[in-house]
Amino acid sequence: MLGCAIRGNAWLAASILCLFCAPAFSQNNLTGKPGLVYSPHPFVTDDSRFVSTVTFTPADHSINYFMLEYLDEVMVSGFLPLNDRLFLNFNLTYLPQLADRVGIGDRHLDLSWLVVKEKGGWLPSLMLTVTAPFGQASFLSQDLVVVGKSFAFGSGSVALSAGYGSPFFFFEGKYIRKKQFGVRYLSGGFAGLTYRPIPAVGLQAEYHGQGTHFSLFYLYEDKVSLKINWLELQSFGFQMTASFPLGFQPREMRRYDR
């Protein structure tokens, strides 16, 4: 199945894009937002960065019940900060097994608002996400609320997150229950844990309303994040994430910093 996922111009182009971007978030969920495997979390970096993510998910754990079957999915995502509290996320879905018939398929867009950002103490972060009422991938609806709290100890850290995703999505002018269409993504409560014994390596565990998943990620020189997702202890998915800063200094300032 992985051999299918790495075929096609879309996969190659997205992979090249990721390799030439820097530096990266330490982890993202499969739709490209900061998060675990399926579930998001409300933690973002202080500096402004555009994030590019490519994720392979095997058919037995893919999101969309497309043409009455589940297929391997390659999702190409972008996460763009509009300011320090608003974030735009977009996705393109590529189905390797239907590349000749579909090509680049579903498109999706949503907006996240970081209502509260933790600044020490016990106050957690709080984020709301709302799906745009247009596009061609309403099954990826991400109307949700998520809270999270991180704790540092020594050279490592632990982050906890929990939230609720709407069990409905907007389709042809009305809201329809995701389960009715076989959609396997963020329906109901979800929670997760990220443990980083050192900054470059982390382990994650989550329950996202459809199953329990684990992941292992490695951050290379703050430039590229590589991640293996172990889905319900049955099959594996893969992810590569990279980003670049949007706040560039003038050439004279960069020369002075050296």
Image (cartoon, rainbow, N blue to C red):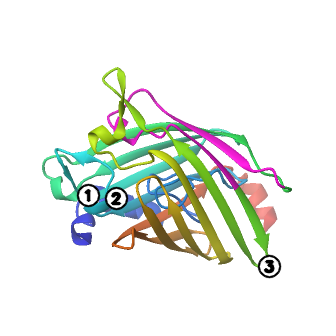
Residue at horizontal 58%, vertical 57%? 244
Residue at horizontal 50%, vertical 37%? 143
Cβ atoms at labels 3 and 1 below 8 Å apart: no
**Separation of residues labelled 3 and 2 (CA atoms):** 40 Å
| Residue 195 visible in the picture | yes
Q: Residues within 10 Å of mark 1 (few under 14, many from 20)?
A: few
Q: Residues within 10 Å of mark 3 (few under 14, many from 20)?
A: few
| Residue 25 visible in the picture | no
Q: Residue 215's spot in the image, x, y percent?
A: 49, 71
Q: Quadrant of the N terminus?
A: bottom left
Q: Residues within 10 Å of mark 2 (few under 14, many from 20)?
A: few
At numbered mark 3, what does the secondary structure look like: helix, strand or loop?
Answer: loop
Q: Amino acid at mark 3?
A: Gly
Where is mark 2, residue-wise? 13
Magenta segment range?
A: 122-148
Residue at horizontal 50%, vertical 59%? 207
Left or right? Give the position of 100 relative to 193.
Answer: left
At numbered mark 1, what does the secondary structure look like: helix, strand or loop?
Answer: helix
Work out whether 226 lies above or below 60.
below
Numbered mark located on residue 9 in the image: 1
Work out whether 173 lies above or below 116.
above
Q: Residue 36's spot in the image, x, y percent?
A: 53, 61
**Separation of residues labelled 3 and 1 (CA atoms):** 44 Å
Whichever of labels 3 and 2 marks the residue nearer the N terminus, that label is: 2
At numbered mark 2, what does the secondary structure look like: helix, strand or loop?
Answer: helix
The answer to which quarter of the image holds residue 108 is: top left
Numbered mark located on residue 154 in the image: 3
Magenta includes 28? Answer: no
Cβ atoms at labels 2 and 1 below 8 Å apart: yes
